[in-house]
Image: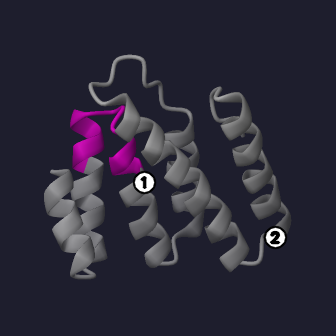
Amino acid sequence: MCYSGNLLRNNKNYEEAILSYRSAINFRPTLALAYLSLGDCLAATNRYTEAETVLKKCLCLDGSKVKDIRSHVAAKKSCMLRLGRMFATIGKHQEAVKVFKSGIKTDESSSQYPL
């Protein structure tokens, strides 16, 4: 499901990609990469509030039972960067700074992503 979403997103067919990523999340609720990609598509369609919710949900995902912890952690870090960048793009500079600072602290402590 995620792969078809990627093809759709790459072709800028965001609405169909959004459906594909939501389906992937339905089947694998801890798949951080699906949340990251869904957030990207929502932001690309100017649905920033939804994108914020999805990206923040990604940051809270438990990776204790995932098969590929490295990909999971990388996707969560990317979610944090995307969230900060999105905030900066839409003029929410204080929130962007908060997210980026949180990312620095998280990287230093290697703990869960606080927000």
Q: Taken as a whole, is the magenta stretch helix, strand or loop? A: helix
Identify residue type, mark 1.
Leu
- Element under disc 2: helix
Q: How many marks?
A: 2
Q: Residue furthest bottom?
A: 12
Quadrant of image for the C terminus: top right
Image side of residue 69 versus residue 94, left or right: left
Q: Residue at x 63, y 28 (%)?
A: 112
Question: Who comes first in sequence, dot 1 or dot 2?
Answer: 1
Task: Residue at 30%, 30% (x, y): give it.
Answer: 68
Q: Of 40 and 20, which appears nearest the observer? A: 40
Q: Could you tell me residue 78's position as x and y percent?
A: 51, 54
Three-letter code, disc 2: His
Q: Nearer the viewer, residue 3 or 103?
A: 103
Identify whether 52 is placed above or below 65: below
Q: CA distance from mark 1 to mark 2?
A: 21 Å
Horizontal side of residue 99 vs 21, given as left or right: right
Against 17, residue 111 (above or below) is above
> Which residue reaches farthest right?
94
Q: Quadrant of residue 9?
A: bottom left
Judge left or right: residue 16 versus residue 34.
left
Q: Are marks 1 and 2 in contact (CB under 8 Å)?
A: no
Report x, y in % for residue 101.
79, 50
Which residue lies under the disc numbered 1?
36
Q: Is residue 84 above or below residue 30?
A: below
- The residue that appears at 78% across and 70% down in the rendered structure is 92
Q: Residue 24 lies in magenta, yes or no?
A: yes
- From the image, tell me which residue sits under label 2: 93
For the record, the magenta segment spans 23-35
Label 2: how many Cα within 10 Å (few below 14, some 14–19, many 20+)? some
In the rendering, at what x and y percent does residue 87 appear? 69, 68
Q: Is residue 62 left or right of residue 11?
A: right
